Image (tube, helix red, strand yellow):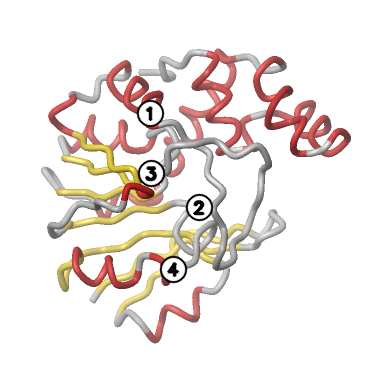
Amino acid sequence: MQDFKLNRELAQLAVLQRIELSGPILRRIRKTFGRYFFSMIASKYFINPSRISKNYFYLMEKEYSIIKKYIQLNNNILSIGSGIGGLEILINKEFNSHITFIERDYVSKKIRYGWDKTNKEAYNNLKLLEIFLENNGFKKNNFELYDYDKGILPNRKFDLIISLYSLDYHYEFNLYKSYLNKVMKPESVLIFDTVRPDYFSDIFKKVEILKEDNNTVHKSKRIACSN
């Protein structure tokens, strides 16, 4: 596998979720004409799906290499805010893991970064996510999709929980805190990006920094938490 099978709709969704996939020209358009124009027009008509597919595959391989050591064969994995699921496809391909997705099922008209307690922004489409997973070799009986806004979430224990650039980066951690208490075992690992890593040293016994990103507006660190 050298890249993902990705149509124009999915390519647009990927760009909205990961601006770094768009390239310098589109980023300049966004800066010049604003985020609304970028979200509704530029990201739809001014993209090259083939190039985005290759960029997205390369990016997901890098993300995968960072967290791979925490994955074991046949793990039961929860993914919160996965985007279109490229990372999870790579995990399933090597480890045959069952992966449960928690997502929001709408695309906001305005791109927003960071979070506050009223943040209701989202950039996903559950139907497109399902199509992308199946088109790239993820068998349907190996994944489940949950719409966060319907209020019904999976109620079982997970070995690994992944939430890259979502939990505590786009949505405040306390939105999920009581839920995570229910679905984490003492040995479970939670991996996510945060702008306040020191805060979690008081919540978890073990916090390991996996990655530091100092080149964005919201400087963040990826951490792995357990116990």
**Pointer 3 or 4: first along the chain:** 3
Determine crowd level at label 4: few under 14, some 14-19, many 20+ residues with C-alpha closer than 10 A: some
| Mark nearer the N terminus (3 vs 2) | 3
Residue 133, x across and y down, in percent: 31, 25
The residue beneath circle 3 is 103
**Vertical position of residue 223 compared to residue 53: above or below:** below
x 17%, y 40%: residue: 97
Q: Which residue is mark 1?
A: 129
Q: Is residue 148 or residue 220 the one in the foreground?
A: 148
- Say which mark, if any, is on residue 165: 2
- Check if mark 1's residue and mark 3's residue have beta carbons within 8 Å: yes
Marks 3/4: CA–CA distance: 15 Å
Asked if marks 1 and 4 touch (Cβ < 8 Å), the reply is: no
Q: Secondary structure at mark 4?
A: helix
Q: Position of residue 142 (x, y in %)?
A: 16, 32
The reply to whether callout 3 and callout 4 are in contact (CB within 8 Å) is: no
| Front: mark 4 or 2 | 4
- The answer to whether marks 3 and 2 mark residues whose Cβ atoms lie closer than 8 Å is no
Q: Earlier in the sequence, mark 1 or mark 4?
A: 1
Residue 90 is labelled as none
Outermost residue to the bottom: 202
**Front residue of this view, candidates 72 and 175:** 175
Crowding at mark 3 (Cα within 10 Å: few <14, some 14-19, many 20+): many
Q: Nearer the viewer, residue 109 or 27?
A: 109
Name above or below for residue 201 compared with residue 132. Answer: below
The amino acid marked with disc number 4 is Phe
In the rendered image, the quadrant that contains the C terminus is bottom left
Q: Residue at x 29, y 72 (%)?
A: 178
Q: Quadrant of residue 48?
A: top right
Q: Nearer the viewer, mark 2 or mark 1?
A: 1
Say which residue appears at 46% left-offset and 27% top-offset: 57
Q: Which residue is mark 4?
A: 173
